[in-house]
Amino acid sequence: MKALDGPAIAVIVSTYDRPDALDAVLRSLAEQTYRRFEIVVADDGSGPDTRKLVERHAEESSIEVRHIRQEDRGYRLAAVRNRAAAATEQPYLIFLDGDCLVRPDYVERHARLAEPGHFVHGSRVRLDPGLSRTAIEQDPGIVRWSAVRWLGEWFRGRVDRFAPLLRVPLGPLRRVSPRRWRGVKGCNLALWRSDFMAVNGFDEGFQGWGFEDNDLVVRLIRNGVRRKEGRYAVPVLHLWHELRPPDPASRKRFEHRLRSDAVRAERGIDRYM
């Protein structure tokens, strides 16, 4: 690919008390081919091990690494993401979970997909427990594995999908569902900071697990921002963890949002500006 003069980017990495996974994610971000970005760790109240880890990466990395932490008062992902977004002035934001490893060209490909008036949703591939341990403890080079190697891991049942790891130039097909909110996950989501600010960021009324990312996307679409597919371009490798059911209160709040015409979050990023 040709050299890219793309936007300055903030990669906002959300985490809570999983420093081993966060270490692997930060290592993968340190190897990016695109260098016009900073890392903002959005910490939902982790203990001192996470602080020490982020400080070490900040000292060793040529990329700026910052740590935004809020008090541990239960699951408040929306709030800490807003705090992190308020702490950066970069015009383009990538939201990434602290248990999602990225390939060396991840930020570069996001920069290439960035387009005014659009958000980009990338795909994810879940690793099984054994492969996740390998990624964390033994083989940080997993992010550079070839498609053939990943195909083998898929045949062995160690990843849930193989297709998202392929590189396919979809062209205009990336805009085939501009108003579709379903399927979007905040673990791999990119958008312009100005669009994020226009809808007042994440709604901090979502304090249980689930739906804060869906709510954001619904409000973005209502405000004229369109979906652009990042599949076959910007996958992440999702380290294994136990799945949890969505919080009933969050589900109810989101269902209410779908019945409304709200665009701006009631309690959002403006609290930190």
Image: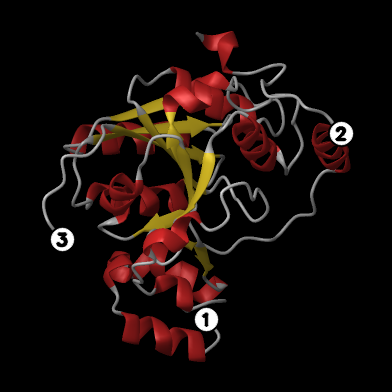
Question: Residue type at mark 1?
Answer: Arg
Res 5 visible: yes
Q: In the image, which is nearer the foreground, mark 2 or mark 1?
A: 2
Instruction: Identify the residue position indicated by label 2 in the image.
Output: 256
Contact (Cβ within 8 Å) of mark 1 with mark 3: no
Question: Residue type at mark 3?
Answer: Met
Question: Residue type at mark 2?
Answer: His
Q: Earlier in the sequence, mark 2 or mark 1?
A: 1
Dividing the picture into quadrants, the one containing residue 217 is top right
Residue at (59, 33) in percent of width and height: 220
**Circle 1 Cα neighbour tier, 10 Å, few/some/many (<14 / 14–19 / ≥20):** some
Residue at disc 3, secondary structure: loop
Residue at disc 1, secondary structure: loop
Query: What count of labels does the image hold?
Result: 3
- The one nearer the camera, 271 or 63, is 271
Distance in Å between CA atoms under marks 1 and 3 = 31 Å
**Circle 2 Cα neighbour tier, 10 Å, few/some/many (<14 / 14–19 / ≥20):** few
Residue 208, position as x, y percentages in the image = 77, 37
Residue 149, position as x, y percentages in the image = 34, 84
Instruction: Identify the residue position indicated by label 1 in the image.
Output: 158
Instruction: Identify the residue position indicated by label 3 in the image.
Output: 1
Residue 93, position as x, y percentages in the image = 41, 34
Mark identifier at residue 21: none
Distance in Å between CA atoms under marks 2 and 3 = 45 Å
Q: In the image, which is nearer the foreground, mark 1 or mark 3?
A: 3
160 up-or-down from 194: above or below: below
- The one nearer the camera, 192 or 240, is 192
Residue 84, position as x, y percentages in the image = 47, 25
Contact (Cβ within 8 Å) of mark 2 with mark 3: no
Check the image and name the residue furthest to the left.
3
